[in-house]
Image (cartoon, rainbow, N blue to C red):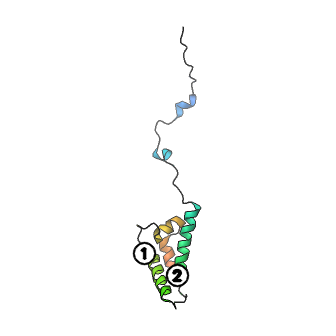
Amino acid sequence: MTVGRASVAYDPSALFAPEILLDVQLMPVPMLPCRGEYALCAAILERALEDAKPNAREDLNHRRSAKREARAWLADDDRTWHFSFLNICDVLGIEPISYRRALTKKGYL
């Protein structure tokens, strides 16, 4: 009984194949927030702006409290909470310093 040789086809393109792979070639594409997360972040920011509105009526005690809380949240630089102003800006692609500057000009802060 004779054992045949395995036929291996020669691939000339292998001559130009890289020997080293970069990390970026192995790493997956960064995850983008899904539409639901994006919508949630947009709703949180929208609610804060509604509560911090400069000309809103403040006849109720809880309304004044909501305004104070919203303005404090918009001015806070804390990144430890998932839904902090800065983290929400990151998800929505908003530059927080410029956004705060615009909010200050309009009387929200």
Labels 2 and 1: the sequence-earlier one = 2
Residue at point 49% right, 78% down?
101
Question: Nearest the camera: 17 or 70?
Answer: 70
Q: Which residue is mark 2?
A: 51
Q: Is residue 109 visible?
A: no
Residue 14 sits in quarter: top right
> How far apart, in angstroms, are the residues tagged by discs 2 and 1?
16 Å
Question: Nearest the camera: 74 or 9?
Answer: 74
Residue at point 54% right, 67% down?
92
Q: Position of residue 108 (x, y in %)?
A: 51, 82
Circle 2 — which element? helix
Mark 1: which amino acid?
A: Asp
Circle 1 — which element? loop
Q: Position of residue 107 (x, y in %)?
A: 51, 85
Q: Which residue is mark 1?
A: 76
Mark 2: which amino acid?
A: Asp
- Going by the image, does 76 lie left or right of 108? left
Residue 11 sits in quarter: top right
Question: Nearest the camera: 80 or 19?
Answer: 80
Residue at point 44% right, 79% down?
72
